[in-house]
Image: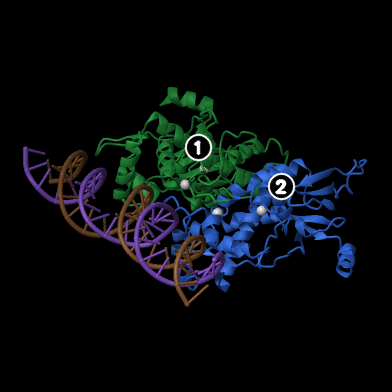
Chain colours: A green, B blue, C purple, D brown
Amino acid sequence: MAVDAIGTEGAGESALSPVMQDYLKVIYAANEWSDAPVTTSWLARRLGVAPSSVSNMIGRLTSLELVHHRPYASIELTGEGQQMGKAMVRRHRLIETYLVAELGYRWDQVHAEAEVLEHAISDLMLNRIDAKLGQPTRDPHGDPIPGPDGTVIMPDAVPLTELQAGDSGVVARICDDDPVLLRYLEDLDVHLDCLIRVIEQRPFGSGTQVEIVPADDSTTGSARAAAPSIVLGNEALTSIWVVRDPQQAATRGADG
Amino acid sequence: MAVDAIGTEGAGESALSPVMQDYLKVIYAANEWSDAPVTTSWLARRLGVAPSSVSNMIGRLTSLELVHHRPYASIELTGEGQQMGKAMVRRHRLIETYLVAELGYRWDQVHAEAEVLEHAISDLMLNRIDAKLGQPTRDPHGDPIPGPDGTVIMPDAVPLTELQAGDSGVVARICDDDPVLLRYLEDLDVHLDCLIRVIEQRPFGSGTQVEIVPADDSTTGSARAAAPSIVLGNEALTSIWVVRDPQQAATRGADG
DNA sequence: CTCAAAAGTTAGTCGCACCTAAATAATAGT
DNA sequence: ACTATTATTTAGGTGCGACTAACTTTTGAG
Ligand SMILES: [Mn+2]
Ligand SMILES: [Mn+2]
Ligand SMILES: [Mn+2]
Ligand SMILES: [Mn+2]
């Protein structure tokens, strides 16, 4: 029996190459937490290739009607492209979740592994993983996992930089771009669902002092240690997204 | 951060392409249950490519000193090639075992999935899988899983065709080349470790009548049903490998 | 408003892994 | 021993996804 060709059968029934799958996935994900237009150079940086390579691939995806692109303008997914990008995001995040839940990965280790596996596993395996995890709706970093039908549950979160002194919020997402930052935050006990209160904004980007409250200790009735107070730099602040404490958001809205 | 290049980092630290990995794996595995020389046309059939493609790739593997090959002669692995081929076999079979044990795959479904995943998972993931399974030494089809140090435990098995009427043996391996055959045997309750007794060899390749004994019922004390008697054709007989019942092998040896 | 810098595209090239067609070597039948 | 068949290699070519270098368009600073 013939050994299967590489890349031909990993994701869905489509004949898209792994590289094309990555393009669609990255373009789709780009507009989840930001509305900045997707440009050639941004994609080149993100994918680690030369801008000319991006131009070339975008040309091909355009002629496949998966993206819209007029030369020198920004890049957008067509309906079909959006579907495929979203499907790849689902794959990526389900795999990340599985690696943490079943194989004991740390949250900074899953991204690289998922980046490859997302193109390799069959739909059967994806469904088994989804079932075993109980159809999770967010990944280890708080990013939403699109459902099989395309449903997406986006938390109403803002970067920590948006909070003023005295404000607090529940961590809903941590940008998984930088594994080093993830390990750093892990050491600081910054996790999903923990409560963060902004104590003091320091001047001239020299950081912000915050207080971390482990949050889901409700299950463990252990005596809660004094909430640690730490200083976070700008890179960390923009990577941590929180859902504002509701009543505070309201008073703030009236306040400012 | 740059998205990782495909195929560069999946297996081990080597820079071998997935295709090269498949060649080394297939050549290695070819000599596990047979000593037939590995030829260009055999590889072409096995890998589903044209013979000229094999010539070309063998040329490249030769110049990488992973195989020995003089034109028109048979193909053999070098020491280094053997190591890498064996490492890929380990990957493949650990993945197969994992899919059955953790994701509920049937034994006829695992091969295609493992064929792709073997190139995609990291060493970290391979080790986690190995640990979770408890360092298994054989895969769902009875093929040996080489240890991390290269240790291989080969059962002393022969194809069912070797047995005479009255002989019996314990199923130690079923060739996983044909998923359809695997499903067929599954339906017939032919499993690893079950006892098979040859009842009658029918003339002119019209099959052999055998008796299946479920074997590892020692755990379940259920009343054992009468051993079913079935007829197996030649393809099935050569695919099922059994370890001869020891005393019978001895008497046979004196007998014949 | 101008024009230099930045962003993007085009042109040409490369290695990989495949193919078909043609040439050559090995093998087997008479 | 000769030759027909089969096995294998060589030659030439394709598409993909990358690159560099050169060119064009857009942007924004003064
Ligand atoms: Mn990827
Ligand atoms: Mn993630
Ligand atoms: Mn493979
Ligand atoms: Mn197997």
Labelled disc at residue A13: 1
Q: How many marks?
A: 2
Q: Does residue A64 appear anywhere in the picture? A: yes
* Badge 2: chain ID: B
A5 is higher (above) or lower (below) than A252: below
Q: Does residue B75 appear anywhere in the picture? A: no
Q: Tell me, yes or no, whether dots 1 and 2 are on the same chain.
A: no
Labelled disc at residue B213: none
Packing grade of label 1 (10 A; few <14, some 14-19, many >=20) is few
Mark 1 or 2: in front is 1
As helix, strand or loop, the secondary structure at mark 1 comes to loop
The answer to whether residue B243 is left or right of residue C2 is right
Q: Residue B78: x percent and y percent?
A: 55, 73
Q: Residue drawn at (47%, 36%), measured in percent from left and top?
A: A165
Among the 4 quarters of the image, the one containing residue B161 = bottom right
A154 is higher (above) or lower (below) than D12: above
Question: B127 or B60, which is in the foreground?
Answer: B60
Q: Residue B19: x percent and y percent?
A: 49, 57
Give the residue number, with chain letter if any, for mark 2: B101
> What amino acid type should be assigned to the residue bearing mark 2?
Ala
Is the CB of the residue bearing disc 2 within 8 angstroms of ligand 4? no
Packing grade of label 2 (10 A; few <14, some 14-19, many >=20) is some
Disc 1 vs disc 2: Cβ atoms closer than 8 Å?
no
What is the distance, in whole Å, between disc 1 and disc 2 at their CAs?
26 Å
Question: A254 or B103, which is in the foreground?
Answer: B103
Q: Residue drawn at (37%, 46%), measured in percent from left and top?
A: A204
The answer to whether residue A45 is left or right of residue A221 is left
> What amino acid type should be assigned to the residue bearing mark 1?
Glu
The answer to whether residue A216 is left or right of residue B46 is right
Q: Residue B196: x percent and y percent?
A: 83, 52
Among the 4 quarters of the image, the one containing residue B103 = top right
Among the 4 quarters of the image, the one containing residue B157 = bottom right
